[in-house]
Amino acid sequence: MNLAAEILDIARRKSVLICCAESCTGGLVAAALTNLPGSSEMFDRGFVTYTNAAKIAMLGVSEATLTRHGAVSEEAAAQMAQGALSRSDSALAVAITGIAGPGGSDHKPEGRVCFGLAWAGHSHTETVEFGAIGRANVRSRSVDHALALLHGALRELPGD
């Protein structure tokens, strides 16, 4: 069983709806989850917020956070996850924002991706440095990492 199918199975058993907020992955996490039959039982919605304006309007990310920390930051990822959670019927949200490439800067290099999780008054953030492995590879590994985060969080949620 692949990881997305395991997520579906655990979420179904625990009656947990999931949502996601994506930037650099452009909806690939939502696609991975909804590619499975029966995914509507566990996947509520996805937000693709590629621009800062979309992050502010659709998820309530604060302009001050974006100015102070930038869109590629754990602070932005946390607010994206919290915003998705509060704007859905979900019990668990994952957020992704990063620099898929090509390009980047010394301060925020290509391959830096920030992740956020939010659920029932809790949150978790982390940054992964995938490196300059190419746009498609950064995006693919970001999806895999987001699915692993969802899987881990689901296992910790009560139920079953």
Image (cartoon, rainbow, N blue to C red):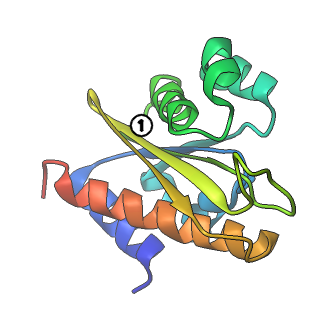
Residue furthest right in the image: 102
Residue 60 location (% of width, % of height) = 61, 18
In the rendered view, does 26 fall on the left or right side of 76?
right
**Is the C terminus in the top left, top right, bottom left or bottom right quadrant?**
bottom left
Q: Quadrant of residue 29?
A: bottom right
Q: Is residue 107 above or below residue 3?
A: above
Say left or right for 128 vs 1. Answer: right
Name which residue type carries label 1.
Answer: Ser
Determine whether 60 is above or below 142 in the image.
Answer: above
Residue 30 percent across, percent down from the top left: 61, 56
Compared with 83, 107 (above or below) is below
Residue ranking furthest to the bottom: 1
Secondary-structure class at tag 1: loop
**Residue 112 appears in the figure:** yes
Left or right placement of residue 49 versus residue 38 in this view: right
- Residue 68 is situated, as x and y percent measured from the top left of the image, at 63, 20
Which residue is pictured at 68% across the width and 34% down the height? 71
Q: Is residue 76 left or right of residue 153?
A: right
Q: Is residue 37 visible?
A: no
Residue at point 67%, 50% (across, down) = 98
At horizontal 63% and vertical 57% (from top left) the residue drawn is: 112
Q: Which residue is mark 1?
A: 90
Closer to the camera, 61 or 64?
64
In the image, is residue 101 above or below residue 159? Answer: below
Badge 1 crowding class, 10 Å Cα cut-off, few under 14, some 14 to 19, many 20 or more, is many
The quadrant where residue 6 appears:
bottom left
Q: Residue furthest front?
A: 106
